[in-house]
Amino acid sequence: MPHWSNQLPANRKHMGFELRRTPAVGNLHVIVTSPDVTVCDTHFYHGRTIPCERPDCPACNEAIPYRTHVYLAAYDPRKAEHFILETTAHAAIPLIEYRDANDTLRGCAIYASRPKGAKNSRVEIQTNSTNLSKINLPSPPDVPKALCVIWRLPTDAATPNNSTSNPPTIQIDSAITAKVHQQPDNANGYIRRQQLQQQLTEACSRTPTA
Ligand SMILES: [Zn+2]
């Protein structure tokens, strides 16, 4: 039996999200789509970023220091791009002030820059409200699940949070995740794994000596 309908299919498919940081030169001018921030401690461990899993964390057990990062989904209306923005806890203080004053971060316009113009220099964030009647803001992804995709963890590693009541399903787009895995903080583990796979393939294809 055909299934006829007079409704268009709901477009709720969201592909993997790219992780972005404030550029050294220039700035980010985006609108937050998440209702709240997601805060997570991360390590740079064996060449890639991993979330800290205290109290039983392999990186902590090796005395590798962690950093606290703040994540949120952000939309660039000029480029129609929706991505995960990572920033430091210090830079995120204006975001917390905005959330507490407005009961949500969704619709908060962010202007993020590095005044010193150097790669890892301090980020400064300014906030402003947006006229949401003039912009079609997309639904936010489940940020912890999007981060699990970026960090190559099973998505069920994301513990439920209260930020989004009915988030769209996240699907993995290999083109986007490949790009993410080549970003400096995430690349080394990925490249190392590719090298190991190549070495393994070569070792297996080598004809055994008599
Ligand atoms: Zn840890």
Image (spheres, rainbow, N blue to C red):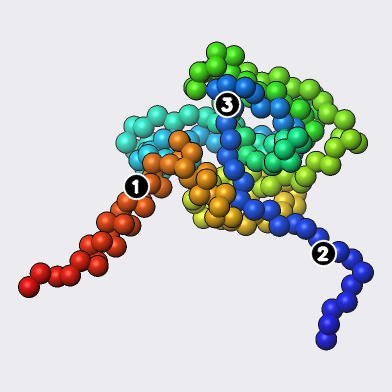
Q: Residue at x 58, y 18 (%)?
A: 114
What residue does disc 1 label?
A: 192
Mark 1 neighbour density, 10 Å: few (under 14) some (14–19) many (20 or more): few
Label 1 residue SS: helix
Residue 20 image position (x, y, % from top left): 58, 35
- Rendered position, 123 above or below 190: above
Q: Residue at x 55, y 36 (%)?
A: 40
Task: Determine which quarter of the picture holds residue 6.
Answer: bottom right
What residue does disc 2 label?
A: 9
- Rendered position, 17 above or below 135: below
Q: CA distance from mark 2 to mark 3?
A: 37 Å
Q: Please state which amino acid type lies under the numbered disc 3.
A: Pro
- Rendered position, 32 above or below 10: above
Mark 3 neighbour density, 10 Å: few (under 14) some (14–19) many (20 or more): some
Task: Determine which quarter of the picture holds residue 76.
Answer: top right
Q: CA distance from mark 1 to mark 3?
A: 26 Å
What residue does disc 3 label?
A: 23
Task: Determine which quarter of the picture holds residue 112.
Answer: top right
Q: CA distance from mark 1 to mark 2?
A: 42 Å
- First in sequence: mark 1 or mark 2? 2
Residue 104 image position (x, y, % from top left): 78, 33
Pick out the residue farthest to the left.
210
Q: Is residue 124 left or right of residue 30?
A: left
- First in sequence: mark 2 or mark 3? 2
Q: Please state which amino acid type lies under the numbered disc 1.
A: Arg
Q: Is residue 11 left or right of residue 54?
A: right
Label 2 residue SS: loop
- First in sequence: mark 1 or mark 3? 3
Q: Is residue 134 left or right of residue 204?
A: right
User: Which residue is more in the foreground, 187 or 49?
Assistant: 187
